[in-house]
Image: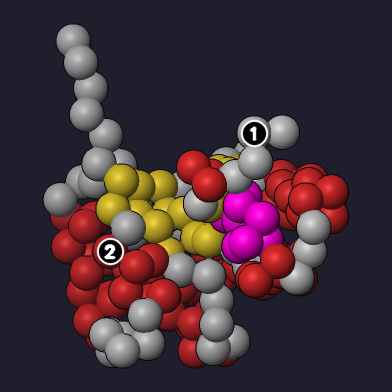
Amino acid sequence: MKTVKVYDITLREIGRSRASALSFKERGEIARTLDRLQVDAVELPALKDGKADVLSNKTIASVVSGPRLSAAVGLTPESVDQTWESVKGAGRPALHVMIPASAVQMEYLCHKKAPAMVELTRELVARARYHTERVEFSALDATRAEPA
């Protein structure tokens, strides 16, 4: 028997764009709906607005019981800790480390070269792993990355 897993990134993608930002109530309703639909995972955006985003994540974590609740972390070890605090109340919390892999993105977003990015990746994944066994990693823009 084949299994299809549904991984919803609606809240993550909407959170990335300030132009189409949803209200606190709308984000909570989307999370409740995804929980009722029994999706396998719900992805939350990285924290940007500090307390408002933390409160939003904590509220979503309290209403989502079935799906894995995966929150994107920022590019600092402190952001990993803050993100974990915002989702640890979920039934199945996870942290998602998303690192740019192409030279252009590494320098534009992080102002770092490849060796420094490898070290940053190690540090962020280790910090996330300290909090939970459920750590996801994504290499952003990987199709344009150098093969090495």
Query: Which amino acid type is marked by label 2?
Result: Thr
Q: Position of residue 89 (x, y in %)?
A: 52, 62
Q: Is residue 84 above or below residue 23?
A: above
Q: Which mark is residue 35?
A: none
Residue beneath the point at 43% across and 80% down: 56
Residue beneath the point at 27% across and 34% down: 5
- Quarter in which the C terminus is drawn: top right
For residue 120, which quarter of the picture?
bottom right
Residue 66 magenta: no
Question: Which residue was labeled with disc 1?
Answer: 147
Query: Which of label 1 and label 2 is nearer to you?
Result: 1
Q: How is the image coloured?
A: secondary structure
Query: Which amino acid type is marked by label 1?
Result: Pro
Mark 2 nearby-residue class (10 Å; few <14, some 14–19, many ≥20): some
Depth check: give the residue in front, 131 or 80.
Answer: 80
Magenta region: 97-106
Q: Is residue 129 left or right of residue 25?
A: right
In this orientation, does residue 59 appear?
no
For residue 84, which quarter of the picture?
bottom right
Mark 1 nearby-residue class (10 Å; few <14, some 14–19, many ≥20): few
Question: Which residue was labeled with disc 2?
Answer: 10
Q: Is residue 5 left or right of residue 125?
A: left
Q: Is residue 10 above or below residue 122?
A: below
